[in-house]
Image (cartoon, coloured by chain):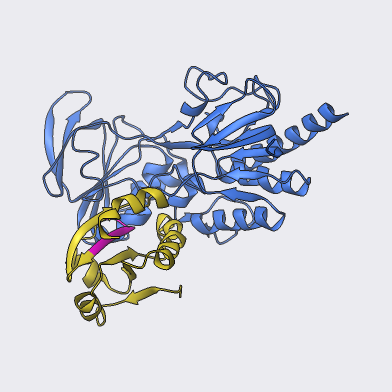
Chain colours: A yellow, B blue
Amino acid sequence: MAEGITDLDMNSFDETIGSSDTPVLVDFWAEWCGPCKMIAPILEEIAVEQENIKIAKVNVDDSPDLARRYEIMSIPALIVFENGEPAKKLIGAKPKGALLEEIGEFL
Amino acid sequence: MKDIRDVIIIGSGPAGLTAAIYTARANMSPLVIEGEPSSTSDQPGGQLMLTTDVENFPGFPDGIMGPELMSNFRAQASRFGAEFVTAKVTDVDFSERPFTINVGDTSYQAKTAIISTGAQSLMLGLPNEERLIGHGLSTCATCDGFFFRDQEIAVVGGGDSAVEEATFLTRFASKVYLVHRRDELRASKIMCERALENPKIEILWNSQVVEIQGDEKLSGVVLQDTVTEDTRVLDIDGLFIAIGHRPNTDLFKGHLRLKDNGYLETQPNTSYTEVPGVFACGDVQDDYYRQAITAAGSGCMAAIDAERWLEDQNS
């Protein structure tokens, strides 16, 4: 478990996302997804470097209901939640620079 | 003056990483510019990052997952001291030695260069295609198949990767149409037999996708019969594209000789390009075999060619 990244499931998701006073970037991923593995270390770096956003992960194998709720059809999928609501959805693996640019408005 | 490396390897699939293992063990301290994360095959580790079971790579009698195999390749290269830069090369200058390889504002110099940038998946080039990626249209069956449980989907293509994807996707989907523009498959016999015997797969022969439909998400495609030219709508929830690859040679246009089909030209039975000191291996120069094992083999050739060429320069 990387420092600063929270694993969420059906039980912890709503409370964690709803009670956060900062935006939360949630990474929907799975063990069998190669591109998901590629961006995992990037998210770990962002978790350490960026103080204004929290990073969390949802394993879609363990929490298919959450994947369905947010209409995930492709992973990695990153959703930024603000005040408990999805504010931005990014699909596919991206290099760190491009990812930071996409979530710049939340940093 | 910046330090000049013995070798820089561009690309990190089976070819590039095998070249890294061999050049590292030859004390050439390779720098591997491995590419950057993406959800296409144009990423560190290459095409195998998007596959599940690799069943034909020798040494793994029970098969191995593609990403795991590539992670092993990389760890083996690291163990012998290969260094990695996770970025894409933006331009090269092979017109004088040492060669210059730029990654954005950072410039690297090397006495030899090994090119192993591989190939990337072709897209259909239809309107709506880009917009619906991740919304029912996928370039990665292994990433996205899971989300199409009990739904009807289609795979476009007739080669090994299309047939393999169609077979893989039957784990999730209730029905998989394989849309192929000819009346026979190009895939290997064992893959074709599996597909033909699979009750969930229906092959739509002589068919091509001429339109992709859907607003928020993909809802169907328009198919045209390549013989009669009749069209019809096929309602589906997911579309997977596996119509082949093109070599990643844009970077080298004007710097190295390309064949008519866009692949890098190498001298027969070697990895030599037309520029002495620049070597090429793997799918970027192979328009015929295109296997992980042949890519790895050619990566070994490029490493040995580079090592001996450099020795000759120094002697």
- In the displayed structure image, the side of residue B83 where residue B191 appears, left or right: left
- Where residue A25 appears, as percent x and y from the top left, is 29, 65
Q: Is residue B146 magenta?
A: no
Residue B206 in which image quadrant: top left
Q: Can residue B199 be seen by looking at this rendering?
A: no
Residue at the (47%, 36%) spot, across then down: B119
Task: Note whether B37 is above or below B118 in the view shown.
Answer: below
Task: Note whether B211 is above or below B254 in the view shown.
Answer: below
Residue at the (11%, 34%) spot, across then down: B232
Residue B107 in which image quadrant: top right
Outermost right residue: B315
Task: Note whether B186 is above or below B177 in the view shown.
Answer: above
- Where residue B181 appears, as percent x and y from the top left, is 29, 30
- In the displayed structure image, the side of residue A7 where residue B287 appears, left or right: right
Relative depth, front residue between B28 and B239: B28
Relative depth, front residue between B155 and B120: B120
Locate the N terminus of chain B by quadrant: top right
- In the displayed structure image, the side of residue B35 where residue B227 appears, left or right: left
- Where residue B106 appears, as percent x and y from the top left, is 54, 39
Relative depth, front residue between B296 and B234: B296
Residue at the (60%, 54%) spot, across then down: B74
For the record, the magenta segment spans A74-80
- Where residue B167 appears, as percent x and y from the top left, is 36, 52
